[in-house]
């Protein structure tokens, strides 16, 4: 769902609504904390010991599974190739995405112990003394997946068939942004539909499927709307990239007012135009030999589930028959 770099391809989006004025931080934080407490008290989420980390109850998982099924049904006519990857992938592939350049603050890298027995004794001693023992770990060859589409592109090296390819991807992702807000998780699931092919086809795919994406979320009773958005790029250069991305409407988000007028709404889904970034980087070509373009539609499965709880209440059994039917809930 997050673009690794700003793309210069301008794509027309559906009409957007001006954001609401931002409320005082204290009021917004209080609302976020109250929603978190409500979710924990209901048992839908389980405190896992760090901000942004939660266990999920069986009922919450039923809702998430239902959302995924509804997304799959919504776009079944695309005949997308279904693939699933692990939540870690090779460090060289991660580096090729340029994610570390644009989003170092969100990155999670895997470290492991490769030292000697003497090193192990020092590590154990440091641990016993309550000291930092991470100095005895070294970078592993894997990185936590920040966007579920990232492990796909290395698998596509070479020439695409005429018409390109479309994929249905789903899995856990990680972004290091601990928060009291239950809508902002460190470990979460995305479902993405990705099209890789000609630039015009990628742009048309993003726009057409974004309209269906919004319609599907409205059918669940959510007060959803589409807005042009930007990714949280890091640093001074990142602020320039964010402005350009917003101006080009390379990223569209479906937002829902989780906290009423206290903020501008929370993104629960997105539609992104990558341009030829992944095609050029990973050596993916169209039949005419040019770098392929790509675009993706992403659904934040936990965020949608939480938006449904915020909208319809913590008693899932009392949700309307129409919503329960859409989610295949008995």
Image (cartoon, rainbow, N blue to C red):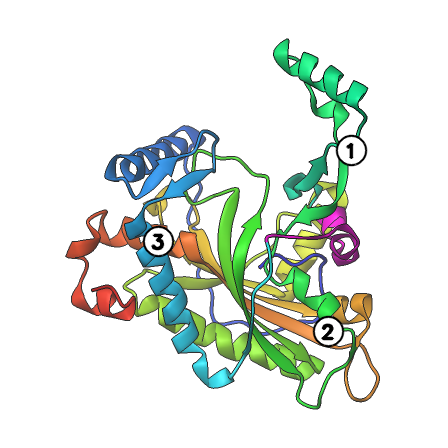
266 is higher (above) or lower (below) than 128: below
Which residue in the rendered view is the most extreme toward the top?
129
Secondary structure under the numbered disc 3 in the rendered image: helix
Q: Dot 1: few (<14), some (14–19), or many (≥20) neighbours within 10 Å?
A: few
- Asked whether residue 174 appears in the rendered view, the answer is yes
Q: Which mark sits nearer the N-terminus, 1 or 3?
A: 3
Which label belongs to residue 162? Answer: none
Q: Which residue is mark 3?
A: 61
- Compare residues 220 and 118 and report the one nearer the observer: 118
Q: Which residues are magenta?
A: 87-102
Could you tell me what secondary structure mostly forms the magenta stretch? helix
The picture places residue 309, in percent across and down from the top left corner, at: 28, 50
Q: Which mark sits nearer the N-terminus, 2 or 3?
A: 3
Which residue in the rendered view is the most extreme toward the front?
117
Q: Left or right: where does residue 168 sit relative to residue 304?
A: right
- Compare residues 107 and 200 and report the one nearer the observer: 107
The picture places residue 16, in percent across and down from the top left corner, at: 47, 65
Alpha carbons under labels 1 and 3: distance apart: 37 Å
Q: How many marks?
A: 3
Q: Which residue is mark 1?
A: 114
Secondary structure under the numbered disc 2 in the rendered image: helix
Which label belongs to residue 156? Answer: 2
**Quarter of the image where the N terminus is located:** bottom right
Is residue 324 on the magenta stretch? no
Alpha carbons under labels 2 and 1: distance apart: 33 Å
Q: Dot 2: few (<14), some (14–19), or many (≥20) neighbours within 10 Å?
A: some
Q: Residue at x 48, y 43 (%)?
A: 185
């Amino acid at each position: 769902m997050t673009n690794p770099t700003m793309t210069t391809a301008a794509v027309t989006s559906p009409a957007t609504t001006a954001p609401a004025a931002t409320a005082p931080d204290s009021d917004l934080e209080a609302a976020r904390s109250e929603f978190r407490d409500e979710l924990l008290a209901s048992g839908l989420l389980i405190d896992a010991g760090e901000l942004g980390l939660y266990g999920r109850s069986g009922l919450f998982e039923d809702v998430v599974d239902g959302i995924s099924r509804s997304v799959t049904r919504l776009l079944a006519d695309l005949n997308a190739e279904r693939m699933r990857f692990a939540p870690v992938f090779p460090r060289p592939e991660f580096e090729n995405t340029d994610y570390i350049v644009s989003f170092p603050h969100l990155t999670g890298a895997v470290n492991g112990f490769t030292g000697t027995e003497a090193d192990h004794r020092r590590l154990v001693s440091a641990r016993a003394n309550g000291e930092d023992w991470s100095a005895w770990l070294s970078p592993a060859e894997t990185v936590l997946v920040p966007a579920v589409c990232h492990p796909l592109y290395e698998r596509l090296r070479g020439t695409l068939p005429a018409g390109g390819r479309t994929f249905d991807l789903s899995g856990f992702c990680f972004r290091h942004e601990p928060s009291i807000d239950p809508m902002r998780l460190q470990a979460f699931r995305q479902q993405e539909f990705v099209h890789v092919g000609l630039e015009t086809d990628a742009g048309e795919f993003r726009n057409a499927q974004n309209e269906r994406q919004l319609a599907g979320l409205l059918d669940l009773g959510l007060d959803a709307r589409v807005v042009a958005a930007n990714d949280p790029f890091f640093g001074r250069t990142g602020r320039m990239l964010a402005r350009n991305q917003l101006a080009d409407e390379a990223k569209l988000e479906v937002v829902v007012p989780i906290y009423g007028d206290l903020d501008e709404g929370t993104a629960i889904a997105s539609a992104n135009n990558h341009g030829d970034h992944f095609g050029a980087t990973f050596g993916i070509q169209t039949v005419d030999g040019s770098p392929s373009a790509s675009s993706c539609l992403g659904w934040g499965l936990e965020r949608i589930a939480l938006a449904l709880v915020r909208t319809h209440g913590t008693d899932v059994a009392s949700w309307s028959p129409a919503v329960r039917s859409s989610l295949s809930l008995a």
